[in-house]
């Protein structure tokens, strides 16, 4: 991955910038533009305001989310903060505006009924409200309503509905910075999915590489939607988090290509970061002629077809080795693992 990729800013950083500008305007009558904030690691980015509005008793400022060169679903979204004076002694009270979700299931880092504004963005906004209050003679008692234009639509492309975050997006970020292709939001969603499943008391979850394998695992084991983890390429994220936060049973389900990489010891199954190793697959079979045919097969699926024609259960051999990789990561964690390998049509071609 190129080191010239541009970093971006989290929704939490954008909400903090918008809140800082809005509260400043509420106290002084003028919006700082650009508005500068301090992130948890000390960076001090400046944000241009895309919209501003001052009325009696309230001020609204908006910032366009710039995710840099990360393929983030919220890149380009308009993050708004409307700040009003609150009751004396209440501090900062957060509200979910249009496009920001509300938590409806236990297991997340905030109670049911709260706006889906994560703890670090809340802390950042509280700190900046306090700074503005000190600078301009305010009390710091405010109601902060965060909204995201079209957030309810964007949220359908995230894990939020499955996690029980309804009505919109989450305001996220632990550092304020989006690192390109770190896929930190996806990995965080995997962890939150495990938290929600544990809080619901589920004894069985499934980590699936895509929608087809998810459907197969759900039908085979009768699993509810919130026991299904959209693992994608991040097998390691599922296994490492379950090691620390175990669920009694884990099913890993995926296509033959991705699970052949897991069988070969890779925990990141993305095509840009790990490759199908045909020599590894060839070594799984005892017949030298068949092994040569596997090496010539070009893809894992091609190797599977060669073995199926020869009556050799390559899918089962891949599943067994993939299970061994998973167990090596989980080590002593009380998690029983089974593996389902499917072809592109969703037919089960291997199990362990």
Image (cartoon, rainbow, N blue to C red):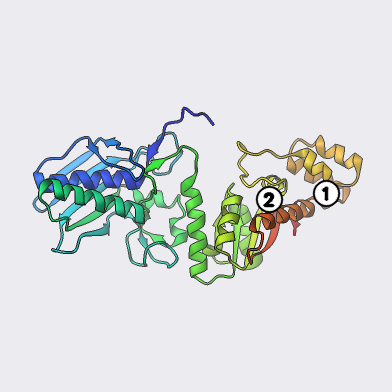
Q: Position of residue 231 (x, y in %)?
A: 57, 52
Question: Are discs 1 and 2 less than 8 Å apart at CB?
Answer: no
Q: Is 175 on the left or on the right of 241, as rendered?
A: left
- Observer-nearest residue: 214 or 143? 143
Residue at 27% x, 35% y: name it. 46
Q: Residue 29 shows which numbered tag? A: none
Residue at 30% x, 54% y: name it. 123
Residue at 35% x, 58% y: name it. 116
Q: Is residue 211 above or below residue 269?
A: below
The kind of secondary structure element at disc 1 is helix
Q: How far apart are marks 1 and 2 (CA)?
A: 15 Å
Q: In this view, does 182 lie above or below 189?
A: above
Asked whether residue 193 is in view, the answer is: yes
Which image quadrant: the C terminus? bottom right
Mark 1 — residue?
308
Residue at 60% x, 56% y: name it. 239
Q: Residue 345 shows which numbered tag? A: 2
The kind of secondary structure element at disc 2 is loop
- Specify few, some or many for label 1: CA neighbours under 10 Å numbering under 14, 14-19, or 20 or more: some
Q: Is 212 on the left or on the right of 318, as rendered?
A: left
Q: Which of marks 1 and 2 is in front?
A: 1
- Specify few, some or many for label 2: CA neighbours under 10 Å numbering under 14, 14-19, or 20 or more: few
Asked whether residue 59 is in view, the answer is: no
In terms of image quadrants, where is residue 18? Answer: top left
| Extreme-bottom residue of the structure | 201
Q: Where is residue 346 in the image (x, y as percent from the top left)?
A: 67, 53
Q: Is 331 on the left or on the right of 20, as rendered?
A: right
Q: How many marks?
A: 2
Q: Where is residue 17 in the image (x, y as percent from the top left)?
A: 26, 43
Which image quadrant: the N terminus? top right
Of the image marks 1 and 2, the number of the one nearer the N terminus = 1
């Amino acid at each position: 991955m190129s080191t010239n990729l541009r970093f971006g800013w989290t929704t939490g950083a954008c909400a903090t910038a918008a809140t800082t500008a809005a509260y400043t305007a509420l106290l002084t009558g003028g919006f700082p533009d650009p508005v500068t904030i301090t992130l948890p690691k000390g960076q001090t980015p400046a944000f241009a305001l895309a919209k501003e509005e001052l009325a009696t008793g309230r001020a609204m400022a908006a910032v366009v989310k710039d995710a840099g060169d990360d393929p983030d679903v919220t890149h380009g979204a308009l993050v708004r903060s409307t700040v009003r004076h609150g009751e004396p002694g209440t501090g900062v009270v957060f509200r979910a505006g249009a496009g920001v979700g509300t938590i409806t299931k236990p297991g997340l880092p905030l109670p049911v009924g709260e706006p889906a504004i994560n703890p670090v963005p809340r802390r950042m906004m509280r700190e900046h409200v306090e700074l503005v209050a000190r600078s301009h003679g305010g009390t710091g008692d405010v109601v902060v309503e965060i909204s995201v234009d079209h957030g309810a639509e964007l949220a359908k492309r995230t894990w939020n509905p499955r996690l029980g975050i309804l009505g919109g997006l989450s305001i996220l970020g632990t550092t304020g910075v989006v690192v390109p292709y770190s896929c930190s939001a996806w990995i965080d969603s995997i962890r939150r999915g495990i938290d929600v499943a544990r809080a619901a008391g589920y004894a069985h979850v499934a980590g699936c590489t895509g929608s087809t394998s998810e459907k197969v695992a759900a039908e085979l084991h009768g699993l509810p939607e919130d026991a299904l983890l959209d693992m994608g390429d991040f097998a390691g994220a599922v296994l490492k988090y379950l090691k620390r936060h175990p669920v009694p049973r884990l099913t890993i389900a995926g296509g033959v290509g991705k699970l052949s990489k897991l069988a070969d010891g890779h925990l990141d199954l993305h095509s840009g970061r790990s490759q199908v190793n045909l020599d590894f697959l060839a070594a799984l079979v005892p017949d030298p002629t068949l092994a040569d045919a596997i090496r010539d097969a070009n893809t894992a699926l091609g190797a599977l077809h060669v073995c199926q024609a020869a009556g050799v259960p390559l899918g089962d051999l891949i599943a067994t080795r993939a299970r061994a990789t998973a167990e090596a990561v989980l080590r002593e964690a009380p998690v029983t693992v089974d593996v389902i390998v499917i072809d592109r049509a969703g037919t089960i071609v291997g199990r362990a």
